[in-house]
Amino acid sequence: MTIKRMDNVAIVVDDLDAAVAFFAELGMELEGRGRIEGVWADLTVGLDGVRSEIAMMRTPDGHGKLELTKYHDPAASSAEPKVPPPNTLGLHRVMFAVDDIDDTIARLRAHGAELLGEVARFENMFRLCYLRGPAGIIVALAEEIG
């Protein structure tokens, strides 16, 4: 066997508190926060003088985790274009299963989320949508129906 599990997905954000609030509103739980710095951090990420803060968010079932990272030094660089479209190469989106997609959208809009399109129905199985969340990340929501 080559891997045991996937531990987390990291997202670099410019406002850590706002990102924590966004994902907490979605239903994730803050597992912990901490500072990351020192030689080991520099060696791991391949940057010099790393000074960052992370917040580890956990899904309610305990299996999925997001590591939200705010770089203080060196400062985070912006991706181009600033708000990439859904077909941009690289990390595409993070999807969450939700109980009530309309309620979830309404709650996340209070945290700056914007729908990319509309809530769509996939056969008689799911209602789906894409939202733009913290740091421009695309958050997909899926509500099982039928």
Image (cartoon, rainbow, N blue to C red):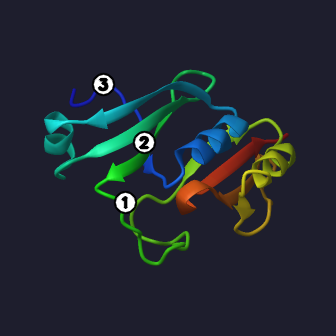
Q: Are marks 2 and 3 in contact (CB under 8 Å)?
A: no
Q: Which residue is mark 1?
A: 76
Q: Residues within 10 Å of mark 2 (few under 14, many from 20)?
A: few
Q: Which mark is residue 4?
A: 3
Decide: is 24 above or below 93: above
Q: Residue at x 49, y 55 (%)?
A: 14
Residue 92 drawn at (x, y percent):
49, 60
Query: Which tag, 1 or 2, sits closer to the chain's start?
Result: 2
Q: Residue at x 21, y 31 (%)?
A: 2
Residue 46 drawn at (x, y percent):
16, 51
Residue type pointed to by label 2: Val
Q: Are marks 3 and 1 in contact (CB under 8 Å)?
A: no
What SS does tag 1 mark?
loop
Q: Which mark is residue 9?
A: 2
In front of the other: 84 or 43? 43
In front of the other: 75 or 130? 75
What SS does tag 3 mark?
loop
- Quadrant of the rendered image containing residue 109: bottom right
Query: Which tag, 3 or 1, sits closer to the chain's start?
Result: 3
Residue type pointed to by label 3: Lys
Query: Which tag, 2 or 3, sits closer to the chain's start?
Result: 3
